[in-house]
Every structure is written in C-alpha cells, then in structure tokens.
Image (cartoon, rainbow, N blue to C red):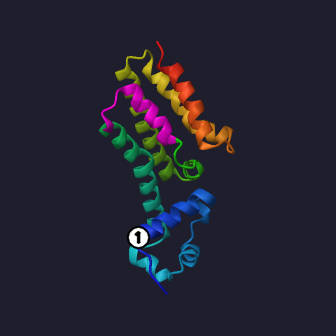
Amino acid sequence: MATADRDTWIEAGLGTLAAEGVHGVRVERLARDLGVTKGSFYWHFTDRAALLDALLAAWEARATDGVIARLEASGAPPADQLRQLVTLAFAVPPDLDRSVRAWASRDPRVSAVLAGVDGRRLATLERLFTEHGAGSPASRARVLYAALVGEPLLHPAQTPEARVTMALEALEGLLGP
C-alpha cells in the first residue's frame, strides 16, 4: 500500500470535517479513503487529537490568516479591501466554517480558537471601516460579519455568486456616510 504525506492527510481530514463534522474524522476511514495504511498516519501524527489540532490550524491559516495577509498585501483602498474580503469569504464552500462552528459548540478548546478567529476577523473589518472613514466602524464591522457568517446558514442552497452579490450590496450600504 502507498503512503500519504502530512498535507494529504490534512486535506482529506478537512474534506471530511466539512462534509460530516468532527465525528466523521476517523483515522481508519481516512486511511481507507486515501488507499494507505494507518501506519502512514502515525508517521505524521501521534494520534487523532494531533490530526484535529492540525485541521484546526489549517482552517485558521486559510480562512483567516491567509485572507488578512492577502488584503494587507493588496495595498488597495480600504473600501476595495472590504469588497475583496467579501468575494474571498464566499469563494470557498461554507461547509468547513459551519463544521468548525458546530465543533466549537461542543469543545471548549475549539471554542477558544474560534473566538480568537472571530475577534481577528472583526478587528480587520473594524480597521478597514475606520480607515475608510465610516462612522461607527465597530457596528458596521459586526453587521457585515453577521452577514458573512449568517448568509450561508440562512440560505444553504444559494450559489456563491448570489451570496457575493448580496453581501456586496449590503457592503455598499455600510460604506456610506
């Protein structure tokens, strides 16, 4: 049987986490799905908990750190960075974010990570609204973030394009005086 590298295990784990939630992330099943031995898993991770930690870190890096870094590197005006953020937020299926939020409701450690992620995301939005010169930037940030997080929950069948259109329309209202 073949082996899989650490990143392959993480990608498979993220896919399962998104599709089935944290309870679906099982070493035996991932090994079977990847067509590899469990020994391949233990070469990269000490146990399932270590894999779950890696999944959480990968989600945080992609869904928050990477997005913020991309916005800051763009050098675009704050309003354009907010528009870019909206587009990036809906560029990936919402299932992974939804699964992490469900996981956080049952695991205090994950809840703490999620609180940190939400805090950094809100701080970024507030900073961009402040730099844009909008009044009540904290309130505007919370409203936009609620739309970004809540829209996929309210309308799960909606296409990413429709979500982007709705969020950009809402953002234009928030960018006003």
The kind of secondary structure the magenta stretch mainly shows is helix
Question: Per the image, is 68 magenta?
Answer: no
Residue at (52%, 45%) from the top-left corner? 91
Residue 139, given in percent of the width and then of the height, sits at 49, 22
**Count of numbered labels shown in the rendering:** 1
Residue at (58%, 57%) from the top-left corner? 18
Residue 68, given in percent of the width and then of the height, sits at 37, 40
Question: Per the image, is 82 magenta?
Answer: yes
Q: Is residue 136 above or below residue 70?
A: above
Is residue 130 rendered to the left or right of residue 111?
left
Quarter of the image where one finds residue 45: bottom left
Does residue 84 appear anywhere in the picture? yes
Q: Is residue 169 above or below residue 62?
A: above
Q: Which residues are magenta?
A: 74-89
Residue at (42%, 55%) from the top-left corner? 57
For numbered disc 1, what is the local secondary structure? Answer: helix
Residue at (61%, 63%) from the top-left corner? 23
Which of 164/43 is in front? 164
**Circle 1: is it few (<14), some (14-19), or many (20+) Cα within 10 Å?**
some
Quarter of the image where one finds residue 153: top right
Residue holding disc 1:
6
Residue 11, given in percent of the width and then of the height, sits at 48, 64
